[in-house]
Amino acid sequence: MYQIMTADEAIGLIRDGDCICVNSFVGIENPVELHEALFRRYHRTLSPKHLTIISSAGFGVWDGERSAERYIRDGAVDKLICGHFGAMLSTKKVILEDRFEAYNIPLGCISHAIRAQAGGLPGALSKVGLDIFVDPRKEGPGINHISTDATLVKYVELDGEEFLYYKLPKITVALIKGTAVDRKGNISFDDMYMSGDALSICQATKANRGIVIVQVDRVVDMPARPRNAIIPGCLVDAIVVEEPGWRDEAYTALTGSFEIPFDEWPSWTEKIDALSSMERKSSIAGNIIGRRAAKELREDDIVNIGIGIPETISQYARKNGMLDHITLTVESGGVGGFPASGKVFGAMIGAASVYDMSNQFDLYDNGGLNICFMGALEVDQYGNVNAHRGPGAFAGIGGFANITAKTPTVVFCMTFNTDGLDVTRKGGIVTINENGAIPKFVREVRSISFSAKRALENGQKVLYITERCVFVLNAKGLRLIEVYPGVDPVKDVLDLLPFEVQADEFRSV
């Protein structure tokens, strides 16, 4: 039977050496008060220590001095396993200092491994990750020099097919954020942007005889409607009630509390961007790329659009009327709305459905998308892409590997180079005024996020769209298929590449 406790009392249930699983998505729906209580306890007693923490999509709040960042930095954690670290500002830095073990596994593969553990299985098989960095035949999932755990990801063959086998440590503590608890202990998520892996995490924890701790906004008298009770009370041990801070109407809109007509999506996007303090940066190069990439959309497409330059695609899909004829999705489980950005990435404006994250990755992993638009840090001569690790810095692979592994059409949206790039477009004519100092096309990528070899074997169509030209992947590598009006194909493209590409036949568009 669950008990209502203070955050400090609930965190007192955690023991040294526990494996904690946090339900969160990048920077949203994190049980912040539970993390703050854990920091207070550790700061006071140096316990709990030797913790392992798992999170499919990371659990930061875009502030290196809040939430879990402080107790991680101070030494409470021995091992961290996450799909994405983008909102964990100080943690990303100390990982590269070899303070503790840290592993980066594709978001969907962590989600499915949690669900497997919930069903009494030790791990989950997947084709996602083959021939990219996480494959133990390449680099493996370890981020720093001391992260050498070979049990997390293994290469296996079964019935003549190749797989990666993802196995997580046994989860003994669940930290969850929900909306309300009723008198039977059932947890609803009505005012949440998503439910993520909440149910699977709780089931896995109880299968391992562990402790489930849930932070909620309020206690309600009326029992939740059965379909709205994401976590049944029988799976909950401790409830912590923390009244939430005030939320602006724009943020409330993301919970689906009221309907947002399709034609009002642009205005709500502007409101949310302003509040998130991560306003969209408009660039001429990004707009050129977005305009061209949007032409790849087809009616009835099911789509995933990545963050950064790919976000401009939705603007042009709206302008050409296509946005009303496609279905957008986001990794956290949202379908049929308009993905929010910035600090609330993972939420959706006007979502038609929000289901468990593992179900969303079932869709992605089985090729259920028609097309995806992703960013890229580097592309090499073979068409491999690095999208997760730069020099001396990383954000993590997130859902990128799952999204691109089997989607029939994969479109990478990237500038040709960066750091000082100056481009103008007037009357349909593109002018490269200044090239950037850092090339995006390299002989060999630093780390592989997307395998061109696998894409060719899968029969996927792969495009690389820049502000000056378009490449397509084929068996020989990259082929130049388009050069924009005003761009000199030799001076502005071919002479700047560190490798040969096929350029025997391309068109000016």
Image (cartoon, helix red, strand yellow):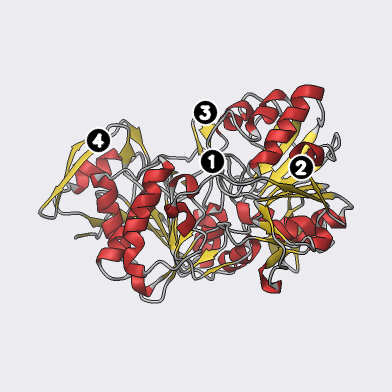
Q: Residue furthest left?
A: 427
Percent x, y for residue 253? Answer: 46, 59
Q: Is residue 173 left or right of residue 384?
A: right
**Dot 2 amino acid type:** Ala
Q: Which residue carries the number 2 mark? A: 150
Q: Give the mark, 4 or 1, whose residue is nearer the N terminus.
A: 4
Where is residue 70 drawn, in percent x and y? 65, 28
Q: Residue furthest front?
A: 221
Q: Is residue 506 visible?
A: yes
Say which residue label 3 marks: 392
Question: Residue drawn at (55%, 57%), measured in percent from left and top?
Answer: 193
Q: Which residue is drawn at the image coordinates 13% and 55% (left, top)?
A: 428
Q: Nearer the viewer, mark 4 or mark 3?
A: 3
Q: Secondary structure at mark 2?
A: loop
Q: Secondary structure at mark 3?
A: loop
Residue 447 is tagged as: 1
Q: Secondary structure at mark 1?
A: loop
C-alpha span from label 4 to label 1: 24 Å
Amino acid identity at mark 1: Ser
Residue kind at label 3, given as amino acid type: Gly
Give how far apart the Cα atoms at labels 3 and 2 are: 24 Å
Q: Are marks 4 and 1 in contact (CB under 8 Å)?
A: no
Residue 211 bears which disc, if any?
none
Which mark is drawn over residue 435? 4
In this orientation, does residue 117 appear? no
Cα distance in 3D space between marks 4 and 3: 23 Å
Front-most of residues 509 and 175: 175
Please give left or right for residue 343 compared with residue 423 in the image.
Answer: right
Q: Quadrant of the C terminus?
A: bottom left
**If you read the primary sequence from the N terminus, does the residue marked by circle 4 or circle 3 appear first?**
3
